[in-house]
Image (cartoon, rainbow, N blue to C red):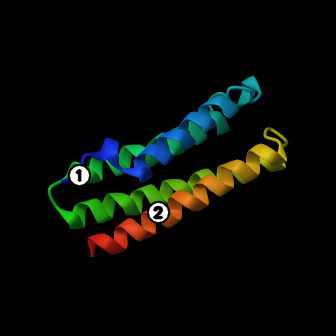
Amino acid sequence: MHKFQDLQIWKQSMNLAEIIYKITSAFPNEEKFGLTSQMKRSAVSIPSNIAEGAGRNNPKEFYQFLGIALGSLAELETQSNLSNRLSYINEKSFEEIIERISEIRRMTYSLQQKLI
């Protein structure tokens, strides 16, 4: 249906995932299998679901996968909030993550509306 690599939403999601990987590399070792792992999985889930949905031949299925990506964005936002509260990430990094999440969320809603 869509070549996912050309979608701006996929590109932005990949950038966010890269940022999350870099930031979580500085988390305490005891979080390796906890918050670090959860944040990485949430971040990777976003562009992965966009890519899978774009690869489907059905706009309704693409819409559904975008919904899953929205869920992963909410998870990542929650995990980022906790990371900030625990002082694993500084305020500047936290604000950048939240800003990127908000932008990707807006792009996702917009794309869903185009698919209806």
**Amino acid at dot 1:** His
- Coordinates of residue 11 in the picture (x, y in percent): 44, 44
Which label number is shown at residue 2? 1
Q: Residue at x 50, y 53 (%)?
A: 72
Residue 113 versus residue 23 in the image, above or below: below
Look at 21% across and 65% down and name the residue there. 59
Q: Check residue 68 in the rendering and tell me which mark sits there, or answer none.
A: none
Give the percent coordinates (x, y) of residue 111: 37, 66
The residue at which mark 2 appears reads as 107
Report the amino acid beneath label 2: Met
Q: Observer-nearest residue: 45 or 47?
A: 47
Residue at 49%, 46% in the rendered image? 13
Q: How many marks?
A: 2
Q: Secondary structure at mark 2?
A: helix
Q: Is residue 93 above or below residue 111?
A: above
| Residue nearer the viewer, 53 or 79 | 53
Classify mark 1: residues with Cα within 10 Å, few (<14), some (14-19) or many (20+). some
**Image quarter (top left, top right, bottom left or bottom right) of the C terminus:** bottom left
Say which quadrant the N terminus sits in.
Answer: bottom left
Is 36 placed left or right of 82 in the picture? left
Instruction: Let me know if residue 20 appears in the view.
Output: yes
Quick check: 96 left or right of 37?
Answer: right
